[in-house]
Image (cartoon, coloured by chain):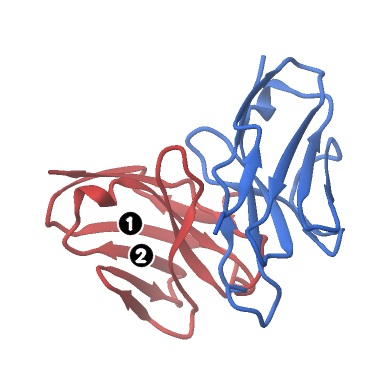
Amino acid sequence: QQQVKQSPQSLIVQKGGISIINCAYENTAFDYFPWYQQFPGKGPALLIAIRPDVSEKKEGRFTISFNKSAKQFSLHIMDSQPGDSATYFCAASKRVRDDKIIFGKGTRLHILP
Amino acid sequence: DAGVTQSPTHLIKTRGQQVTLRCSPKSGHDTVSWYQQALGQGPQFIFQYYEEEERQRGNFPDRFSGHQFPNYSSELNVNALLLGDSALYLCASRSGTGRPGANVLTFGAGSRLTVL
């Protein structure tokens, strides 16, 4: 049973465009929803995170939109740059400082120069 | 400031063998967790160590075991290796509750295990 479903599996966006990655979760006990960015040969790195008591969080070009009733959340990357090309994982956990994090399968993003 | 360091970077084993992977957490961190990342998949939580004890465990068999040392470093041991154990094994660390960085889980670059 996949607790966090992520789509699309891969995404190609023109430089300057908007990249959108969607995720859905099943377990209503989840209370923390981070996004991780992973470059080839590196471990995942925390990009941005949200808790379900807010509907949107923005940090620079990265925005999380959260729909608690639909149990869905998404990552928007504005003005996408070639340096954003990486694999992105949505994730969920029951607490902010919980290491038992459930990851989605990932989205491989490629930004065309 | 060195982040999370893992060794070895790559290794090849045969079915039935045993493997030990090592992790040094980021300076100031005292909690270590291990994840398995199969090719093309997201990381899966194996277990977490704090104060030299296993605190949480994911859905992995007893063939997977670990240890945390007084200096907070950690080892992951896998016995009776199967072909399906081939994956990138990631170590992650964080600082204790109330300390700076407690909310951020920092990952190492991983150890790539190939089982033939």
Q: Residue at x 16, y 61 (%)?
A: A79
Element on which disc 1 rests: strand
Element on which disc 2 rests: strand
Q: Residue at x 80, y 57 (%)?
A: B71
State which chain disc 2 sits on: A
Res. B46 mark: none
Chain A shade: red
Res. A74 mark: 2
Q: Residue at x 52, y 32 (%)?
A: B39
Q: Quadrant of residue B114?
A: top right
Tell me if residue B105 comes above or below residue A96 in the rendering.
Answer: above
Q: Which residue is mark 1?
A: A21
Chain B shade: blue
Q: Residue at x 85, y 64 (%)?
A: B51
Crowding around mark 2 (Cα neighbors within 10 Å: few <14, some 14 to 19, many 20+) is some
B62 to the left or right of A70: right
Confirm or deny contact between disc 1 and disc 2 (CB under 8 A): yes
